[in-house]
Image: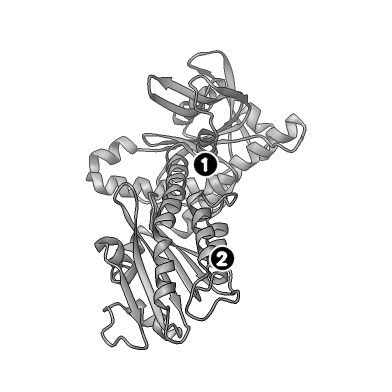
Amino acid sequence: MNDVPEGQVDQAALTALRDWMIDGARPSARAADIINTMCDRLLEAGVPIERFALFIFTLHPNTKGRAFYWRRGKPLHVREADHTLARQPMFRNSIAVHVMETGKAYRCRFERDNDLPPFSDVLEIRDEGMTDYLIEPLVYTTGETHGVSWATGAPGGFSDDQASALESLRAPLARLTEIYMLRLNAASLLSAYVGRNSGRRVLEGDITRGDFEKITPAILFVDIKGFTQMTGDLPPEETIARINGFFDVIVAAVTEAGGEVLKFIGDEVLSIFPVGENGEAEADAEAQAVRAARTALERAEAAFAETPEQRLPYRAAIHVGPVAYGNIGGGDRLDFTAIGPGVNMAARLMKVSGETGDDLVCSAAAAAYLEGCKPLGAFRMKGIRDPQPVFSLPEPVGTGPSPA
């Protein structure tokens, strides 16, 4: 802090901070940079904050909310609450959730207030040595309410001048966090529904119908066996729970191996593994992509070995070939996906797998980069003039029986 008299605020420094926030906190682009800068400048203006927290709800399939914790002299800490945790009493009964749901602010001056709000996290903040705690709602233009809190351990807590300074930042902070949340939610939802890399490209402006690039990735198709019978035998909620458990494993395995899940087609999963971008020779890049697809199956089987209840009978096919990767669709409804000969071949391989009884197959193009593949013969495929050789893949490590 500068030489501001105790209890008072450097109004010029506060005004400069508020103007910076209203102007978009430029050039800071990361939430951590904005929070660290804001808190440091508050200290310089004479506001003795020792603890800051920002609580926001998110639009994410797995995450209910996110919290940013700043403490003087320590790195910023970010915590996420998944939807399961968000239903737990500890989360539901926190003062932050209460403020966000009711829109009611609280100020706890621990040195003088005996009647504290009935939340355990308030007592935890007091026990950290804080003397004053202020938690307020952040109201967005949509009416959504999130939360922000400030705490100090200074004797006597925040002065009236300091508390007013914090209150003056609530509106610009709400606008800043709303902008951040809009972009975070857009990125999260695009990643969830069109894929991580595809979502990034859409956000970067690849949104015109017909925009595409030609790539030659490895393509992995995974198809649940007996899906039609399952949907007839089980109630819908159990069917959905079982296929979601199976997809949890497959998606994680693909992502960890460097691939991207492009689409769920009923009980099928279409994934691609882009060729390398570090100047490798074409054959080396294709080999790397094909082996990554194979690694995804290995990772999936390793996970199924640990959680056999998530395993379902499935078939898989690997191919490497050209596709058009980009925007297709009609009117205002577009999809960012891959189409073309490579995808067609991978889909046809799945059909051959059903005919031969071999659950794991690959094309000749993919087999050239893998060890242990065995020829199954040449097969006629719809839309392809000449019979195509098909190979079986060796069973991934950890393969075991699927649950009935």
Q: Give the number of callouts.
A: 2
114, above or below 347, in the image = below
Q: Is residue 213 left or right of residue 176?
A: right
Q: Which badge, 2 or 1, comes first in the chain's sequence?
A: 2
Query: Which residue appears at 43% of the width and 55% of the height?
Result: 172
Q: Secondary structure at mark 1?
A: helix
Q: Quadrant of residue 282?
A: top right
Q: Quadrant of the N terminus?
A: bottom right
Q: Look at 65% across and 41% down and name the residue there.
A: 291
Q: Amino acid at mark 1?
A: Arg
* Cα–Cα gap, marks 2 and 1: 36 Å
Classify 10 Å Cα crowding around label 1: few (below 14), some (14-19), many (20 and above).
some
**Would you identify the image quadrant in which residue 102 lies?**
bottom left
Residue 396 visible somewhere in the drawing: no
Q: Give residue 271's position: percent from left, percent from top.
A: 52, 36
> Which residue is located at x 30 percent, y 62 percent?
100
Residue identified by numbered label 2: 41
Tell me where residue 11 appears, x and y as whole percent.
50, 66
Q: Nearer the viewer, residue 103 or 365?
A: 103
Q: Position of residue 269 (x, y in %)?
A: 45, 37
Task: Residue 36: give its label.
Answer: none
Q: Position of residue 391 (x, y in %)?
A: 59, 31
Of the residues tagged 2 and 1, which is closer to the observer? 2
Disc 2 secondary structure class: helix
Q: Which residue is mark 1?
A: 196
Residue pushed farthest left? Answer: 235
Q: Is residue 205 left or right of residue 284?
A: left
Is any part of residue 321 visible from this angle? yes
Please name whichever residue, 62 or 340, is drawn nearer the observer in this view of the structure.
Answer: 62
Q: Farthest residue in the top direction?
A: 385
Q: Nearer the viewer, residue 327 or 400?
A: 327
Please name the colour scheme applied to the rendered image. Answer: one colour
